[in-house]
Image (spheres, rainbow, N blue to C red):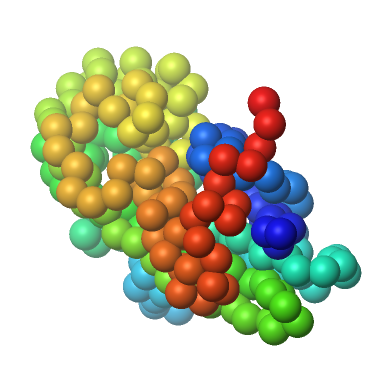
């Protein structure tokens, strides 16, 4: 029997990806401090926040039997700074415009804390995907910001939505840009917890 899966995130994109895989899971939104002091690389940042999210859920609940808690975090790196979620529409517009004709990197961290056959384990990793934008005009950026789509997205764009219209090339895992690198999730579950894909995907009844 597959362990109980808990998604420690309120992200609708991550929930949709797990549903796409047919996974049975519960959503418990974590309550943790996401503040990080000092200089830190995008890889270190997303791994740290993802682990905090997973740990907050584990510490707040007593799960019976085997379980795996999945925490995740995503940021966009423009080569100089980390781009989180925009403050407002104007910030979204300026951020989106700044990506015009440039390459940015999307980093998503995965943290897994679980117990399998009485053995508890915690592991984290991140995946980087490079995204090359085409030219974005002032009018395009204004339109996109006013659509509301980028307001809750790291880097102020959604590759799976209207934002994808402006992406010329993508190098790496597409799902990583959406918010959860499912291929890396699979290998981590296999390598760290001894689970094969058939143990947990395609189980959900629709």
Residue 195 placement: quadrant = bottom right
Q: Is residue 82 visible?
A: no
Camera-side residue of 137 and 180: 180
Camera-side residue of 114 and 130: 114
Q: Residue 145's spot in the image, x, y percent?
A: 40, 24
Residue 168 placement: quadrant = top left
Q: Residue 117's spot in the image, x, y percent?
A: 72, 78
Residue 15 placement: quadrant = top right
Considering only vertical position in the picture, is 71 above or below 51? above
Q: How many marks?
A: 0
Q: Residue 159's spot in the image, x, y percent?
A: 33, 33
> Residue visible at 25% across and 23% down?
165
Q: Is residue 161 left or right of residue 148?
A: left
Considering only vertical position in the picture, is 120 above or below 19? below
Q: Is residue 114 left or right of residue 153?
A: right
> Residue visible at 58% across and 56% down?
199
On-image quarter of the N terminus: bottom right
Camera-side residue of 191 and 147: 191
Q: Residue 19's spot in the image, x, y percent?
A: 58, 37
On-image quarter of the C terminus: top right
> Residue visible at 12% across and 29% down?
135
Camera-side residue of 148 and 15: 15
Q: Is residue 113 visible?
A: yes
């Amino acid at each position: 029997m597959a362990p109980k899966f808990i998604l420690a995130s309120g992200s609708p994109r991550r929930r949709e990806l797990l549903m796409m895989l047919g996974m049975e899971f519960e959503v418990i939104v974590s309550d943790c401090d996401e503040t990080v002091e000092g200089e830190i690389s995008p890889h270190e940042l997303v791994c740290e926040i993802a682990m905090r999210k997973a740990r907050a859920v584990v510490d707040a609940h007593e799960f019976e039997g085997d379980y795996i808690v999945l925490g995740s975090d995503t940021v966009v790196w423009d080569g100089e700074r980390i781009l989180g979620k925009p403050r407002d529409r104007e910030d979204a517009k300026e951020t989106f415009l700044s990506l015009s004709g440039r390459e940015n990197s999307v980093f998503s961290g995965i943290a897994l804390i679980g117990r399998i056959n009485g053995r508890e384990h915690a592991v984290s990793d991140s995946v980087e995907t490079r995204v090359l934008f085409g030219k974005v005009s002032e009018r395009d950026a204004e339109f996109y910001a006013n659509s509301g789509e980028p307001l809750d997205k790291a880097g102020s764009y959604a590759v799976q939505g209207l934002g994808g219209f402006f992406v010329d090339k993508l190098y790496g895992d597409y799902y990583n840009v959406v918010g959860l690198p499912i291929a890396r999730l699979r290998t981590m579950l296999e390598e760290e917890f001894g689970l094969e894909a058939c143990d947990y995907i395609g189980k959900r009844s629709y």
